[in-house]
Amino acid sequence: MPSPARNRTVPRTVAAVATAALTCTLALTPLAAASAAVVPSPISDAAAGAALKLTPIGSHDTGVFDESAAEIVQSYRDRLYVVNAQAGSVTVLDNSDPTEPTELFSLADTGTANSLAIRDDGLGVIAFEADDKTANGSLVFFDANADAPQRARLGAVTVGALPDMVTISKDGAYAVVANEGEPAGDFSVDPEGSIGIVTLPKTVSAPAQSAVRIAGFGAFEEDGAKKLHDNVRVFGPDVAAPDQGDKPLSANRVSRNLEPEYITVDGTTAYAALQEANAIAVIDLPRAEVTSILPLRFTDHGLAGNGFDASDRGGVIDIKPHPGVKGIPMPDGIASYSAAVAGKTATYLVTANEGDAREWGDYEEPARVKDLGKDGLAPVCADSELATQLGDNDLGRLNVSIEEGLRTGPDGTPCYGELYAFGGRSFSIWGTDGTRVFDSGDQFERILARVAPQYFNSNHSEANLKGRSDDKGPEPENVAIGTIDDRTYAFIVFERVGGVMVYDITDPTAASYVTYVNNRDFSAKPGTPEAGDLGPEGVQFIGAQRSPTGQPLLVTGSEVSGTTTVYAIDRLVGGAPATQPDIQVLTINDFHGRLVQESNGVAGASVLAGAIEKYRQQNENTLFVSAGDNIGASAFESFIDDDNPTIDALKTAGLDVSAVGNHEFDRGFADLTDRVIPRFEGDENADAFSDFALGANVYVAGTDEHALKPYTIKEVDGTRVAFVGTVTEQTAGMVSPQGIAGIEFRDQVASANEAAAAAKKEGAAVVVLLSHEGSAGSDCAAIATESGDFGDIVRGASADIDAIVSAHTHQKYACEIGGRPVIQAHQYGTTLGTLDIELTDAGELESITGGTVSLYNQTLGQYIAYPQADTKAVVDRAVTVAEEKGRVQVGTITADILRGKTASGSEDRGIHSTLGNTVADVYLWATTQNPNYGGQKAEVAFMNPGGLRADLLYGTDGGAMSYREVANVQPFANTLVTLELTPAQIKQALEEQWQPDGASRAKLALGVSKGFTFEYDPAASRGQHIRSMQLNGEQLAPEDTTTKIRVVTNSFLAGGGDNFASLATGTGVADSGQVDLQATVEFFAAVGPVAPAPLGRAYLVGAQPPVEQPGFPGPGAPGENPGEGEPGEGENPGENPGGGPGAGEPAQPWALVALGSSTVAQGGSLTATVSGLEPGQRIDATLFSEPLVVSGIPAADANGRLSFTVSIPRDFAVGAHRLVITSGALAPIEVGVTVTAAAPTGQLANSGGALPMGIALAAGLALVAGGVLVGARRRRVS
């Protein structure tokens, strides 16, 4: 019978943490434990059918009233860090038991703490303003993991004036701080506002001052390069900056006026609220540049739904529209998230529209409406409808801006035709272009009027009905965003009346109210602990997998009451809190040694382990299983150490069961049984029958003997759960035949059904099939009816099998087919599959539900869990080993092998490259000549330019290539996939090199393998670029839809990546069993010195493709002397000789080489121009016979032309030499050059042509056009 404990989440016991004195600058202030009970009856309300409930469960009270003793809050693991501005420090709370947050110590530094942020690894940063707030402040970095506080401080950097909010980018690369630049209290000086961007180290350590860059607003000044929108508010007295000097005030008026406050980061873009300016600054973090300033739309309070209560008098709540009154949103808190609208995913900004007036020295922006026309202020226009609403019970007591709404009145003098109130009394959602897509209008006030009719617009310093109606109402101060059950919520805190308002913002255009709760007792005197929370400022959502309890939490910091309060968030189902399933199974598949975090949501092993740990904390009846391919085709950190780190990491993460995948056989069956299984088991004597290598359809060849354990049974709280493992029958064609000579792979359906029946006989109440087979798509209806091996499994699995966990195809789906869940959890540890099992009172299966959970929260741009410490230690060791082993040489290259480049040398993915073609050759070799490949041979290979992330450079070490250098070229660890395409499909794939309208790049030039060529017209219309195609010299008919050609490419491209949709339409898709890095390393070992593959396989219309010899290795490289002796008879110095093989028959030259002069003096320079090339073609040049190898030669331009310069060392041998031009396999072109003795001192050496005189010579060596390489065999000049 199920245990009642299964359905409860129990808070963890408070951890005992020692408190020690903190030395150095970051000081420790011991604090007595102070806790505050939540108020007896918090105000609470919920919409009908609300999916959430907030309950305050614990609070901490500093005992300091109205001194900003608790403002910004930041959670990190089991701790809360709370800014205490009153003490100028950050208070650290132990939150392991959220019902009783306990003070540990505080962190202080020079100045006043304003904000803080903490990266997932514990690198923390606190923003401190200087004692003189107009002076530059600092960011102090600390280690949030430090148990000894005296070792917490790591260092500090200086930033701009009054650093207010600091945050860390989602990828952990930058700390971003809003330097508010607020004026002095007496308005004597006004510093410039700015954004500080600090590039962070990858380790928990402080950055250097050189890592700090400041993005200012200078470009938006009157004479700046960027136009400031007229609706961005720049106003008030024009006061000099502290460092103004002789600079005219007009030169930095905008920069001094703009005051950044809150910041949110999305990717490499930050958005900063410029509150008083009613705008948002957009900042490019890599460039440290404010790219734009978005003015925010005013709220028309005259419209229905935008009304408000305008007076603090009268004793009656009167929420209504006020024509002629506008609201200036002036957001304070800002947050960002990702959402899909009409099928399009985009970033949205959420703002709490607090409103704030400028009041410094004698300047006061706000005035009550009834005071307009007095003390030198312009009146309300006599002809305005507002003129009749100046009484105290109307608009008379409303505070408005004196800077907005002026026009010329009937008498020709200025008057206010419209009134502009501060704030929107709302929250808004904006597109990143500044378009408002939602505003809550008067909803806040109407909800509060219903929920707290006696205090709906109360102040935080006293309890009253509507003391803030004449100002900014409830005053929405800040906002946090969280996700629960695939829904996105905004948590908005109110500074004045207090409390948290929750909205569902999953659809940003249709946000809806969910619930409101206020931990405040209005009957208690403000300033006493009994009053509860007053003036919330900071708010943070804590997801379940980041929470100390495993339950979602919300934390608020209230600056008036000095309290920090923790709220439990309960998921509601039918109005009642959701419960945990009786048994929970978490699944992964196709992990492939992805130990470290990568792009595209790859969480890494330590975050995966952290999530598993939290799920187990929520439900102790949790099993963690895999459907195979844990190892093999792995990322570099695992591959380089035989996947041992992955085995160790998965064991440390708590893996309970695993099926085998095809990649578990990559190194042969003996490796699986003699090394992999014993390492999983922690027993060198372990046999093949292991829970970590289930394979019911793997048999000893020619017998009915199982070669691997077919199934295992796990007992969970008295219930027996069985797992059956099978692996794709195609494994035999994916791995080396020699490695699996003694085993065979049989029918999965029959094997699974037989094992399931046996498990049932052993008393299993639940049977789960772990099948390393899957669907090629994610549509459940298609999966239910698909043909092929997986279709057979889905429909042929017996009734004994209660759920199917699939793998192999790297898809993400959670279907119910035939009454049972069929799931797959994507790949690489990006996703967890879930099986929620409910049991009857008798312990029998009642229901089983499948699902998937992404480990990367795309909505928030955050991994759902912290790295688990023990697994992180395994990963860190693996990274260290990989760095060491990565320096090992795997082979050599004969010359630079480069990506497509522009004439300036920057990467251009629209240019065909030697590297793209070389990698395509690797793919073709790996699926034709690699002895470790057992599949069908490919005929053509394609490589996408976006997958090439580094060049292979010859360097000074004879072209030696290390593991790491090779791995850097293709860092994504894609597998090689073969598929069949018709010539028509290949032609369409080639047409897709010209990308769709709106794509980030107009063209992505594919690398193609030896033997395949195609002719193209770059000027043709879309779909008509490809004129002809050839395979091994034979023409392919582009209209041929029947002939099948086996193509190999990487798994990304095979899935239609980079808009190559036609490649995803292939048939006979098969994983080759090889990862790109593995294939490249084996290619280097087998082929020997690797030469750049030639260009010209993609050739312009009218040109001719290169003729290449079949097979590998490729041709030689530059620097190898193609022949001795003098230039041939009849050659004209300085021109392309055009000579070639044959009995006196000159071959047609493939290019024309012209020199500025055929004679050059020692220490001089020589120019060469090469024409007749293909656009983007690259050449190599070597001056023999020393030899001198030229590097940095640009690719040919659109006209097939390039130029380069050779600098002649002063000690270069005089006499006749040869400049040899090569390009891939094309015949070398030789040009005669004569080097003469250096000119006498004081005379200029002959440069061989007109060149700039600014070429620098150092120690007799010249650097020109990218440098000249000279070494033992080739001299290097640098």
Image (spheres, rainbow, N blue to C red):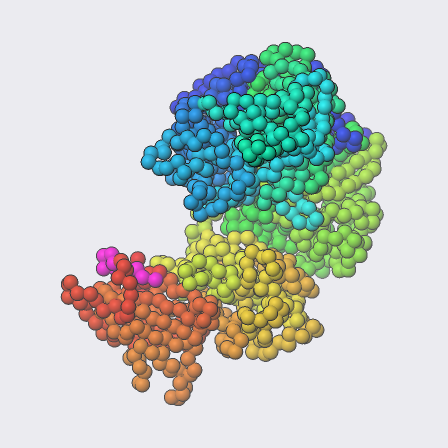
Between 736 and 449, the one nearer to me in the picture: 449
Q: Is residue 992 above or below residue 767?
A: below
Q: Report x, y in % for residue 136.
A: 40, 30
Residue 212 visible in the snapshot = no
Residue 352 colored magenta?
A: no
Say which quadrant the N terminus sits in: top right
1 on left or right of 1140: right
Q: Report x, y in % for residue 879.
A: 49, 44
Between 640 and 278, the one nearer to me in the picture: 278
Q: Report x, y in % for residue 1277.
A: 29, 60
Q: Is residue 1189 above or below residue 470?
A: below
Between 623 and 20, the one nearer to me in the picture: 20
Between 203 and 632, the one nearer to me in the picture: 203
Residue at image point 37% right, 30% down = 242
Residue at image point 61% right, 71% down = 1024
Q: Which residues are magenta?
A: 1257-1265
785 on left or right of 813: right
Say which quadrant the C terminus sits in: bottom left
Q: Report x, y in % for residue 789.
A: 75, 58
Q: Quadrant of residue 902?
A: bottom left
Residue 1259 colored magenta?
A: yes
Residue at image point 39% right, 32% down = 241
Residue 802 visible in the snapshot = yes
5 on left or right of 84: right
Residue at image point 31% right, 66% down = 1206
